[in-house]
Image (spheres, grey):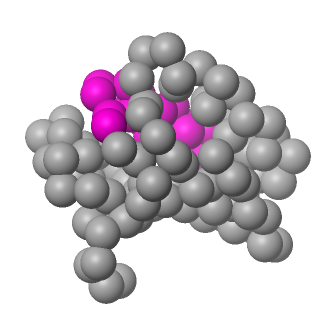
């Protein structure tokens, strides 16, 4: 995972698998960046994610709660088709911007 900070935008480039075992350390690093920057926009880039279960949904939802507390927004971008499907089925599009890999804004 890599985190890029530009002004009030935090972009997180996720890699590998997001499941029950890997989600906790990912959450911690993202939350540390959120606490430091208080971003207006948190972008979670899923381009490097090879597998995701419901822990990925929880990851987005929890970060949404954090940034929306002060008016920030969350976008999940470059979602592989399976991850996009999981997030759509969970209703995340109501609280976060969702974009599949290759999809334009």
Left or right, 74 with respect to 40, comes to: left
Stretch of the chain drawn in magenta: 51-68
Count of numbered circles on the image: 0
Left or right, 60 with respect to 28, comes to: left
Q: Residue at x 74, y 63 (%)?
A: 4
**Residue 86 sits in quarter:** top left
Whole-percent x and y of residue 62? Answer: 51, 31
Q: Residue at x 42, y 60 (%)?
A: 47
Magenta span dominant secondary structure: helix
Q: Residue at x 45, y 54 (%)?
A: 48
**Residue 104 sits in quarter:** bottom left
Whole-percent x and y of residue 3? Answer: 72, 55
Identify whether 59 is placed above or below 55. Answer: below
Left or right, 104 with respect to 23, comes to: left
Q: Residue at x 49, y 59 (%)?
A: 45
Left or right, 27 with respect to 86, comes to: right
In magenta stretch: residue 66:
yes
Q: Which residue appears farthest toward the top when viewing the image?
A: 21
Whole-percent x and y of residue 83? Answer: 25, 46
Question: Can I make out residue 97 in this image?
Answer: no
């Amino acid at each position: 995972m890599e985190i890029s900070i530009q002004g009030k935008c935090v972009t997180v480039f996720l890699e590998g698998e997001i499941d029950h075992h890997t989600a906790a350390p990912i959450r911690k690093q993202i939350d540390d960046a959120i606490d430091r920057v208080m971003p207006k926009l948190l972008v979670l880039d899923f381009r490097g994610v090879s597998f995701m279960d419901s822990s990925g949904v929880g990851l987005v939802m929890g970060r949404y709660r954090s940034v929306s507390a002060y008016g920030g927004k969350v976008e999940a971008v470059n979602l592989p088709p399976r991850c996009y499907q999981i997030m759509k089925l969970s209703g995340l599009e109501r609280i976060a911007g969702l974009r599949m890999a290759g999809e334009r804004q």
